[in-house]
Amino acid sequence: MSERKVLNKYFPPDFDPAKIPRLKLAKDRQYVVRLMAPCNMKCTTCSEYIYKGKKFNARKETVQDEEYFGIRIFRFYIRCPRCLAEITFKTNPKEADYDLEHGATRNFQALQTAEKLAEAQRVAEEEDDKANPMKMLEKRTAQSLLEMEKIEALEELKELNERQATVDFDGMLDKNLQQQKETAEQRQLREEQEIRAEAEAIFKRKGIEKVNGVRIKRIKDDDLEEEEERLKKIPRSDPLQSVESHQSSSQINKLKGLVRIKKVDEPPQCSSSATNSKPGASGLSLLQAYSDSDEDS
């Protein structure tokens, strides 16, 4: 089995290649080859569309009396997959493409057309530059200015990279790793400490201090003076009397619609001594007046 793949063949010492007879073949002989359609085409017989890349068993021949700088040109024969009409095309080494000769028409290809137009424009510009040296000088000056701008932009990018190089990326990565390794308890403790620090900052901003575990708000002197002035403006009265009067007025208002006050008859007129007595006299003095009148009678 190993001899089947041997590349070196044995030639005897008396081998003479000139003695091997050569076959006389025609120059326009044809070979059967396997190829793909070089472009999108449409059959002129049945209007069948043949897309680029479809495989065919084609006949190949060399075009006689036609070449391009010593490069031979080949012609291929294929058949339409629908109506079996023969389609021929040949190579075009000048444009690195294929030319359809018979049996089909080439579909429009925008990319190929754009490339041809761009190439024609480039050739026309080169000829114009050769004919007008001043225009060529202007183009070269514009190109040099553009190159200088690109170099300046590149230098700015380099300086920016050098500034960013001072950042300690390794330290940042280590810090992130430490934060990831932090346990749940440590994270909770750290969050509590942060909350406590924020609360202390808020209390300090509002003037509240912690003395022996008790929070005390320090009042400024201005606040004390304002409080004293406000208390001075309030009228002073007996607190008990004000409370009793308030309670009695509230009870009277409640019973006003329920209780009917009875009218009391006027007492009989007393003697002159009694009437002449002062209104503020007591009961004993009145009794004495009555007793004196009885004795006189």
Image (tube, grey):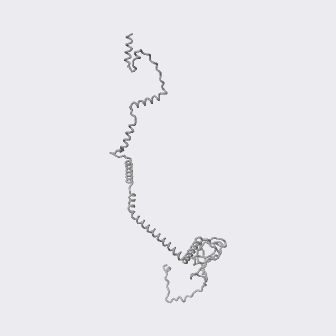
Q: Nearer the viewer, residue 115 or 226?
A: 226
Q: Is residue 81 above or below residue 245?
A: below
When asked about the image quadrant of residue 285, the answer is top left
State the image coordinates of residue 46 (x, y, percent, origin top left).
Answer: 66, 71
When asked about the image quadrant of residue 184, the answer is bottom left
Q: Is residue 237 above or below residue 82?
A: above
State the image coordinates of residue 115 (x, y, percent, origin top left).
Answer: 57, 73
User: Total marks drawn?
Assistant: 0
Point out the image quarter for the C terminus: top left
Q: Nearer the viewer, residue 36 or 13?
A: 36
State the image coordinates of residue 200 (x, y, percent, origin top left).
Answer: 37, 49
Q: Is residue 253 above or below residue 70?
A: above
Q: Residue furthest top?
A: 297
Q: Is residue 151 above or below residue 59?
A: above
Q: Nearer the viewer, residue 112 or 206?
A: 206
State the image coordinates of residue 152 (x, y, percent, origin top left).
Answer: 45, 69
Q: Residue furthest left?
A: 212
